[in-house]
Amino acid sequence: MAAGKKTSLTKRQREIYEFLRDKIVNRGYGPTVREIGQHFEIRSPNGVMCHLKALERKGLISREQNMSRAIQLAESPQNRLNVRLIGTAAAAGPIQPSVSLDESVSFREVFDGMDLGCLKVEGSNFAPLNIASGDYLIICRDAQVTPGCHVVALDDRHSVVLCTVQEGSSQLVPLISGGYTPTTRQVLGVLTGVIRRFRRPLPPAEPAT
């Protein structure tokens, strides 16, 4: 935070700003109004909003209307959940560049949730779903299980199974069919994304002097 901006804040505004910054930097997304109120024992949501509006007026944060977690730090070099869209890659065709230089894709919904977890995949059990060994399954443990969503569950053998929630019912249907039909015993959470990490190239060695 710039020194000039920091001195213009009240003690409570500074505390709330540091709380926002900690959550955004270390957790990956901002807290809700309710979380802020509970942390600072502010009973009224309007009281929290007054502090947020003050921080916004002073140029420290930006907010998107009607989105509970859409708080961004103005000083952040980039929102790491937003990636600039450079084009469309079609199979056996040339890249189609993005029309707008400012267009970006948000992956915020992948990490949206208060209780997030991940599972590291080992082996080729999920290969039919194009999920490889070493991939990470991002799971939202507090998300509501609704028809059409994908869930990560444990079966009667305590093995991880990926299921979809059948439309019109709450029945879980395994995404991979095989000779054994598992019985789901415990739902770990809703699957919100799969992350695959590739090895990044090492920077070139500096020439000896």
Image (tube, helix red, strand yellow):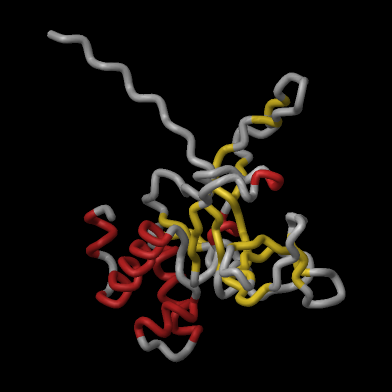
Residue 151 left/right relative to 121: right
| Residue 121 shown left or right of residue 93 in the figure | left
Residue 145 vs residue 7: left or right? right
For the C terminus, the image quarter is top left
Relative depth, front residue between 71 and 158: 158
Q: Residue furthest bottom?
A: 43
Q: Splitting the image into 4 quarters, where does residue 161 fall?
A: bottom right
Rendered location of residue 40, percent (x, y)? 35, 83
Q: Residue 63 appears at what percent x and percent y? A: 52, 62
- Residue 18 in percent (x, y) is at 31, 66
Query: For the point 55% across and 42% down, which residue is it?
Result: 83
Single out the residue that lies furthest toward the front. Answer: 179
Residue 10: which quarter of the image? bottom left
Residue at position x 34%, y 63% from top? 22
Q: Quadrant of the N terminus?
A: bottom left
**Which of 90/169 is in front?**
169
Would you place residue 104 above or below residue 189 in this image? above
Q: Residue at x 33, y 22 (%)?
A: 203
Q: From the viewer's perspective, tell me whether residue 124 is left or right of residue 7.
A: right
